Image (cartoon, grey):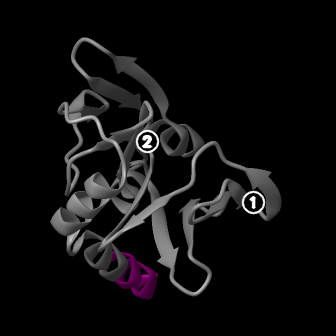
Amino acid sequence: MIQRKVSTMLLTAALLTGSVAATAAFAQSAPVQQQKITVNLNGKELPFPQDIVTENGVAYVNASTLAIALGGSAAWDTMSESLLVAKDSKYALRMYQNSTFAYKNGKEARVPYAPRVTTGAVLVPLVYIAQELGAKVSYDAKKLTYNLTIEIKS
């Protein structure tokens, strides 16, 4: 249990390191929307280590920040170039870089958008991953704000 928490903290620190460079690298490789988007979780702003990146109408956020805020975890596997998003011991989604092929709870599946790997961070589609982790999502276009609601177990 303690080892898992330490591993999660180390992974989070590793993913967050270089996030400014990661955002810059991602912004250079894709057409992005420059408007400031915010995410609220249960009515409070959820801070991300780098700006939210939007490409073709899809908002991408830091994988571990989102997963941890919603009671889950996210870990990048450099060998298989895949991201494992998990929650409790009931949900596991393995997504692959540049691919919509995935495994959901051990079964082959398709995801609408692949995770984006940048220097020091892995970005995931906000709405899809938030819903997969049990959050209800709404978007306020006038305020450029995503509102997530989920019961947080303490």
| Residue 153 on image: x %, y % | 43, 47
Q: Depth-wise, is mark 1 or mark 2 nearer the camera?
A: 2
Magenta span includes 3: yes
Where 87 sits versus 17, above or below?
above
Secondary structure under badge 1? loop
Pointer 2: what residue? 126
Magenta stretch bounds: 1-9
**Rendered residue at 49%/35% (across/down):** 135
Question: What label sits on residue 105 in the rendered view?
Answer: 1
| Residue 65 on image: x %, y % | 32, 57
Label whose residue precedes the other's in the sequence (1 or 2):
1
Question: What label sits on residue 152 in the rendered view?
Answer: none
Q: Is residue 99 left or right of residue 151?
A: right
Q: Is residue 96 left or right of residue 119?
A: right
Front position in the image: 135 or 122? 122
Within 10 Å of the Cα at label 2, are there few (<14), some (14-19), or many (20+) other Cα atoms?
Answer: many
